[in-house]
Structure formats: structure tokens, C-alpha cells
């Protein structure tokens, strides 16, 4: 007699475990790639041209210049306290992911320490170093980790100070770049700020992508025509909301839809074409889930 088949619950748990392991391996792979990218940005672009990064990595670069001990040693040692802070403030998974990423970053910077610089043009080094570092950090953050403890420190102080996390990080970096001005020279400190800003913007692009979502609110008497055009020409769904004019008290129809940044210009064109007097408001949004947001092919 054949054995009893596995229950649906056991099969479901086994499948969930396989998916979970696959997801963890995928995250580990991208954290590895992100850490190596940051190491490349540091060791083949910035450091050979005496340009620095911000945060704990920036301090590590300055200590390397002063002591001639490899930067990877300082990156690892200075970040150790933040592993514990990350574990307490954010969670075990974040702490382990960050530990893995920073370990890879430390090893990769040591391995690439004597690599031949890609360029000796300081402007090119600043530009491409910032892009490479930003891409690496963005990949790691997107997969649940961090490569610098200054962000964790900023989160810790955020609840105690009347400033945003970004403002605390920037304030922290003012002192680091100021110190860099005395150690590397003020022109190199200014190039370092440029590299930091480029890296910061690249992180945004990696995290949000070119498909960064935006919400659009449109008030028009021609709401039906505009809504139909958005559906037909952009392939986006729309929702009609009931509104009331604050001054006139008249009933209004409000069109609400979600687009990406590449579709913003097209949406403006549609609204201008259908009703040049329409009210249009567009705002960035952090996340979209559910519904039928993904674009459908319109035939």
C-alpha cells in the first residue's frame, strides 16, 4: 500500500523554506557585488587621487593617510560598535547583512590596495568614483544591509535631536571633510564633497530606479476625456474621486493615478491637450503595492 502523501501544510512549508533560502542567497550575492563596487570606487578612483568619502569610510581613509595601515582594517574595526547598535535598533537580519557587507568591503579594499588607478584625472576620478560607490551602497541598502555605521548612528540620535537623519549625517560629514581639508588639502576636500554628492544621488537612482513612482491628482471638467486618454495612451488605471470646491462649494471630480518618472512629461501633455486650465499636482511617492500598477500592453 502506498504511503500517505505529504499534507498541503508540509509541502507549503518546504516550498517556503526553499524560497526563503533562494531569497537569502540572492540578497547575499547583491550585497557582495555592492561591497566590491564600493571597494573599486575607493581603491581605483578616489584614494589614488587623494579624494575621500564621508562617514566611517571617510575617517578610515584619513587614518590610512596618517598611519599607512590599510583602509580595510579601519573600516572593519570602526564599524564593529555599529553592528551592535544595528542589532538593537533595526534587527538581527540587518546586523548580519551589514556585517557581511562590511567584511567583504574590508577584504576587497585590502585586495585592491595596490591596483592600478583607472585614471589620474582628478575630475574623472571624482565623478566615476562617486558613481561606483553610490551604486555599491545602493545595492547593499536595497538588499537589507549597510556599508557604513554613520547611518545607524544618525538613526540613534534622530530620536533625541530635532533634526532629520539626513541632516545629522550631513552635520557629521562636515567635520570629516573639514578634517580632510587639513590632512589632504582644501582642494581635495572640495573634490571629496563633490564625490559624496554624486554618490548620494546615485544611491537614490539605484534605490528608486528610473521607474520611481509618482502620484498625480487632476481636477478638470473634462475628467472623463482625460481619464480615458491616460488609460489608452499611458496604460495606467485611474480612479475618480468626488470632491468639493472650497470657495465655490461646487462638486468636483478628481482623477487620481500612479505613473513613473518617464511618463510624467506624457501625462502633462495629455492634460494640456485635453484641458489647458486643468489643475494638476504631481508628487513623489516611496512605495506602491497591490492593485494593477504594473503597466499593461494596450492593443
Image (cartoon, helix red, strand yellow):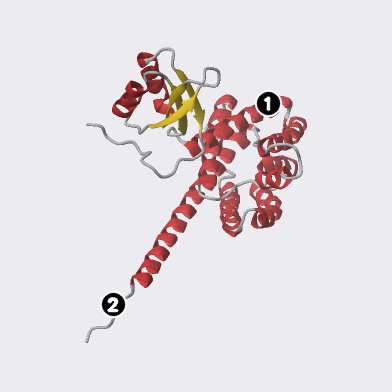
Front one among 223 and 249: 249
Q: Which mark is residue 68?
A: none
Residue 120, image quadrant = top right
**Quadrant of image for the C terminus:** top left
The residue mark sitting in front, 2 or 1, is: 2
Query: How many labels, in total?
Result: 2
Q: Residue furthest top?
A: 276
Please determine whether, in this image, residue 184 is positioned above or below residue 112. above
**Secondary structure under the numbered disc 1 in the rendered image:** helix
Q: Position of residue 138 (x, y in %)?
A: 53, 41
**For mark 2, does the 10 Å Cα neighbourhood hold few (<14), some (14 to 19), or many (20 or more) residues?**
few
Residue 61 percent coordinates (x, y): 68, 41
The answer to whether residue 115 is visible is no
Which element carries disc 2, helix, strand or loop? loop
Q: Which residue is mark 2?
A: 5
The answer to whether residue 293 of the structure is visible from this angle is yes
> Does 187 appear above or below 42?
above
The residue at the far front in this view is: 249
Q: Earlier in the sequence, mark 2 or mark 1?
A: 2
The CA span between labels 2 and 1 is 68 Å
60 or 230: nearer the viewer:
230
13, 110: nearer the viewer: 13
Picture coordinates of residue 203 (x, y %)?
A: 54, 37
- Residue 75: where, in percent of width, then height? 66, 48
For the point 56% across and 44% down, the residue is 39
258 sits left or right of 38 in the view: left
- Checking the image for residue 190, the label placed there is 1
Give the vertical position of 220 relative to 47 (above or below): above
State left or right for residue 169 relative to residue 42. Answer: right
- Residue 181, quarter of picture: top right
Q: Are marks 2 and 1 in contact (CB under 8 Å)?
A: no
Amino acid at each position: 500500500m502506498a504511503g500517505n502523501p505529504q499534507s498541503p501544510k508540509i509541502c507549503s512549508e518546504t516550498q517556503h523554506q526553499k524560497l526563503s533560502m533562494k531569497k537569502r542567497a540572492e540578497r547575499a550575492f547583491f550585497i557582495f557585488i555592492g561591497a566590491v563596487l564600493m571597494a573599486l570606487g575607493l581603491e581605483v578612483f578616489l584614494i589614488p587621487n587623494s579624494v575621500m568619502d564621508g562617514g566611517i569610510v571617510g575617517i578610515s581613509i584619513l587614518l590610512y593617510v596618517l598611519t599607512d595601515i590599510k583602509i580595510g582594517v579601519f573600516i572593519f574595526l570602526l564599524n564593529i560598535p555599529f553592528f551592535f547598535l544595528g542589532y538593537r535598533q533595526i534587527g538581527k537580519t540587518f546586523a548580519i547583512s551589514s556585517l557581511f557587507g562590511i567584511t567583504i568591503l574590508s577584504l576587497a579594499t585590502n585586495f585592491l590596495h595596490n591596483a592600478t588607478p583607472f585614471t589620474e584625472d582628478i575630475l574623472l576620478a571624482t565623478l566615476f568614483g562617486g558613481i561606483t560607490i553610490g551604486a555599491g551602497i545602493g545595492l547593499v541598502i536595497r538588499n537589507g544591509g549597510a556599508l557604513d555605521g554613520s547611518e545607524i548612528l544618525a538613526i540613534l540620535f534622530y530620536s533625541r535631536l530635532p533634526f532629520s537623519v539626513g541632516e545629522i549625517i550631513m552635520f557629521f560629514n562636515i567635520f570629516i571633510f573639514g578634517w580632510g581639508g587639513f590632512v589632504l588639502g582644501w582642494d581635495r576636500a572640495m573634490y571629496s564633497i563633490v564625490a559624496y554628492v554624486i554618490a548620494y544621488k546615485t544611491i537614490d537612482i539605484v534605490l528608486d530606479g528610473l521607474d520611481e513612482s509618482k502620484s498625480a491628482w487632476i481636477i478638470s471638467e473634462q475628467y472623463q476625456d482625460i481619464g480615458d486618454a491616460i488609460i489608452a495612451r499611458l496604460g495606467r488605471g485611474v480612479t475618480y474621486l468626488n470632491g468639493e470646491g472650497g470657495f465655490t462649494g461646487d462638486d468636483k471630480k478628481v482623477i487620481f493615478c500612479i505613473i513613473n518618472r518617464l511618463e510624467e512629461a506624457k501625462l502633462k501633455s495629455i492634460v494640456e491637450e485635453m484641458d489647458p486650465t486643468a489643475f494638476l499636482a504631481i508628487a513623489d511617492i516611496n512605495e506602491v503595492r497591490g492593485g494593477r500598477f504594473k503597466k499593461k500592453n494596450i492593443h
